Amino acid sequence: MNPILELRNVSKSFGKQKVLHPLSFDLKKGERICILGPSGCGKSTLLQIVAGLARADGGEVHMEGRVVEKDRTYVPPEKRPVNMVFQDYALWPHMSVRQNIEYGMRRRKTPPEAMRDRLARLQALLRLDGLLDRLPAELSGGQQQRVGIARALATEPAILLMDEPLSNLDVKLRTDMRNELARLLGELSIAALYVTHDMMEAFTIADRILVLRGGHIDQIAEPHVLFERPETPWVAQLMGYHN
Ligand code: ADP
Ligand code: MG
């Protein structure tokens, strides 16, 4: 089966600092890959390049068989089949929950009827009853992140990008949301790139885990393979092996 997303030798520097060394991987239709790595290893940069929010220095990005970045070719974010959920929610503070969710659909000129249908479906899926007319500041962190997820899903992306979506929540809520998200992504069978530095999140959510370290892919494999056959000392250490 053709991958829905392909990265070929994607690299990125900021000034003299090489943040992503040429790296390549595929995401299959409906597959969930967690990008796992310590702070500063390039996770957000990688996701932003896929989203089209940052340019790669070199390499190619393909989506649904189409080039979205290569040499001078660059397809802007709203024309890519992706949408993103941010760590700090990034909701529009002056807009109601409803307006936040509708924003991306309006930009993409979604017909009003389809907008109504999707809003109703997302309201049920993400348990937003009674919240649609509130402002983000009137919601808890968990509710805000559910709105962030609804807003991203509203544009019906083929690929959902999530950048540490749970890391601003307290521990109890994070555990609940982790399980809820795993179930949701399974039900939607949507392809996702999910960035985290939390091993439990990666193991709960991922079909495959991409271990990123210093802008290199240490290993990309199914969770049990990482555990049973770590290919680098770093992955072994992450999996709890001590020598
Ligand atoms: P992560 O998400 O894994 O914590 P990032 O991708 O945010 O890592 O950052 C990787 C490295 O690139 C860090 O050293 C960071 O300081 C640097 N970096 C990220 N964005 C920029 C930028 N816009 N300008 C300069 N340096 C940046
Ligand atoms: Mg980050």
Image (tube, helix red, strand yellow):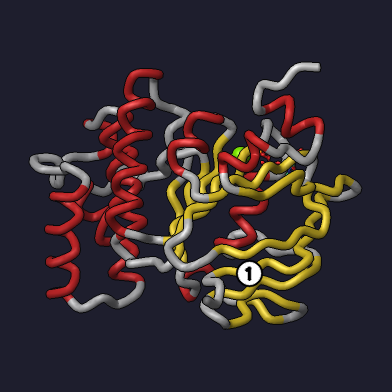
Q: Amino acid at mark 1?
A: Glu
Q: Quadrant of residue 71?
A: bottom right
Residue 238, image x and y in percent?
68, 27
Is 96 in front, or is 231?
231
Residue 224, image x and y in percent?
57, 39
Furthest toward the front, the residue is 228
Residue pictured at 73% horizontal, 69% vertical: 8
Residue 173, image x and y in percent?
32, 24
Q: Quadrant of residue 158?
A: bottom left
Q: Secondary structure at mark 1?
A: strand
Is 162 in front, or is 23?
23
Q: Quadrant of the C terminus?
A: top right
Residue pictured at 30% horizontal, 77% vertical: 109
> Seen in the image, is 8 located left or right of residue 149?
right
Residue 175, image x and y in percent?
36, 26
Classify mark 1 as within 8 Å of ligand 1 or not, answering yes or no.
no
> Seen in the image, is 66 located left or right of residue 200?
right
Q: Callout 1: few (<14), some (14-19), or many (20+) C-alpha neighbours within 10 Å?
A: many
- Location of residue 78 with respect to 31 vertically, above or below: below
Is 136 in front, or is 236?
236
Q: Which residue is mark 1?
A: 6
